[in-house]
């Protein structure tokens, strides 16, 4: 069925205009971006195929132009548009964190980390460097490991904090396994980095463990 053949209140564009973007499913929002489908497959079905292929919106947010080539009917123009929209989402969240303190927008922090790290196939250790007002200076991916572990060097984290004149940091790493539960090794690493950074008067405010669906705060769990 073509989208134009759907009842008017079920068409993504009309539904958005009448009820707002929050009323649309992920597939419906993607259909608006795609605009057209293929013979036998409308834009709504293509949107759902994208979600199924990449494991939902979190996985799609990590997909690059090359990965999107596997979707039949997704030509260079549509791939470029999708990648551009996803990058705009990342930049919008980064701008929000640069203008406000991280503690004023805790959900934005989680969303930003999930966008950056949530669906990576390998483990990434990143640091959000903050100014004296707890506003984001920059997020840097400092270390990359295998699916199960990564090597993090406290000296490198300290040097970057000094170079950026950071007053505090938020640590973050992803668990490609999908479990957001901090491990004993995560706890030990946090304490090691906390001690190293304290020597140069930089505070560790939190350490997040990130998956495609969660960003768990170690501070909230009492593990910092």
Image (spheres, rainbow, N blue to C red):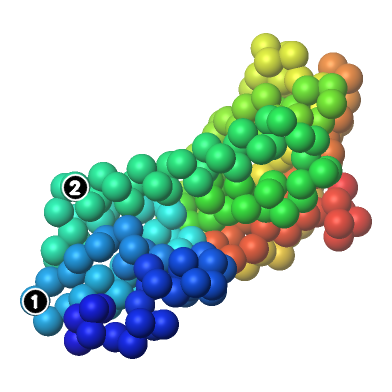
CA distance for labels 2 and 1: 18 Å
Q: Residues within 10 Å of mark 1 (few under 14, many from 20)?
A: few
223 or 9, nearer to the observer: 9
Q: Secondary structure at mark 2?
A: helix
Please tell me which of labels 2 and 1 falls first in the chain: 1
Q: Residues within 10 Å of mark 2 (few under 14, many from 20)?
A: few
Q: Secondary structure at mark 1?
A: loop
Q: Horizontally, is 183 left or right of 48 in the view?
A: right
Q: Position of residue 89 (x, y in %)?
A: 50, 46
Q: Position of residue 43 (x, y in %)?
A: 25, 71
Q: Which mark is residue 205?
A: none
Residue that appears at 84% across and 39% down = 205
70 or 159, nearer to the observer: 70
139 or 149, nearer to the observer: 139
The residue at which mark 1 appears reads as: 39
Residue 221 can be seen in this image: yes
Residue that appears at 66% across and 38% down = 96
Residue 210 position (above or below residue 193): below
The residue at which mark 2 appears reads as: 77
Residue 120 position (above or below residue 11): above
Look at the numbered discs 2 and 1 and tell me whether their residues touch, using CB distance below 8 Å.
no
Residue that appears at 77% across and 50% down = 106
**The N terminus lies in which quarter of the figure?**
bottom left
User: Which corner quadrant of the image does residue 197 belong to?
Assistant: top right
Q: Position of residue 57 (x, y in %)?
A: 45, 64
């Amino acid at each position: 069925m073509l989208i134009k053949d759907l009842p008017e209140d079920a068409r993504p564009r009309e539904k958005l205009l009448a009820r707002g973007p929050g009323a649309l499913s992920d597939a419906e929002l993607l259909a608006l971006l795609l605009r057209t489908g293929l013979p036998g497959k409308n834009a709504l079905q293509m949107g759902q195929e994208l979600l199924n292929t990449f494991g939902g919106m979190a996985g799609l947010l990590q997909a690059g132009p090359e990965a999107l080539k596997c979707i039949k009917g997704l030509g260079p123009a549509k791939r470029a548009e999708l990648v551009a929209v996803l990058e705009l989402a990342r930049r919008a969240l980064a701008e929000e964190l640069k203008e406000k303190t991280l503690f004023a927008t805790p959900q934005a922090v989680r969303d930003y980390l999930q966008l950056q790290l949530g669906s990576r196939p390998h483990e990434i250790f990143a640091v959000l460097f903050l100014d004296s007002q707890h506003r984001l200076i920059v997020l840097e991916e400092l270390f990359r490991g295998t699916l199960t572990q990564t090597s993090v060097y406290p000296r490198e984290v300290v040097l970057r904090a000094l170079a950026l004149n950071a007053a505090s940091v938020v640590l973050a790493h992803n668990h490609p396994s999908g479990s957001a539960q901090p491990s004993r090794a995560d706890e030990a690493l946090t304490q090691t980095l906390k001690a190293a950074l304290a020597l140069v008067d930089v505070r560790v405010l939190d350490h997040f463990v990130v998956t495609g669906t969660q960003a768990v705060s170690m501070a909230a769990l009492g593990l910092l």
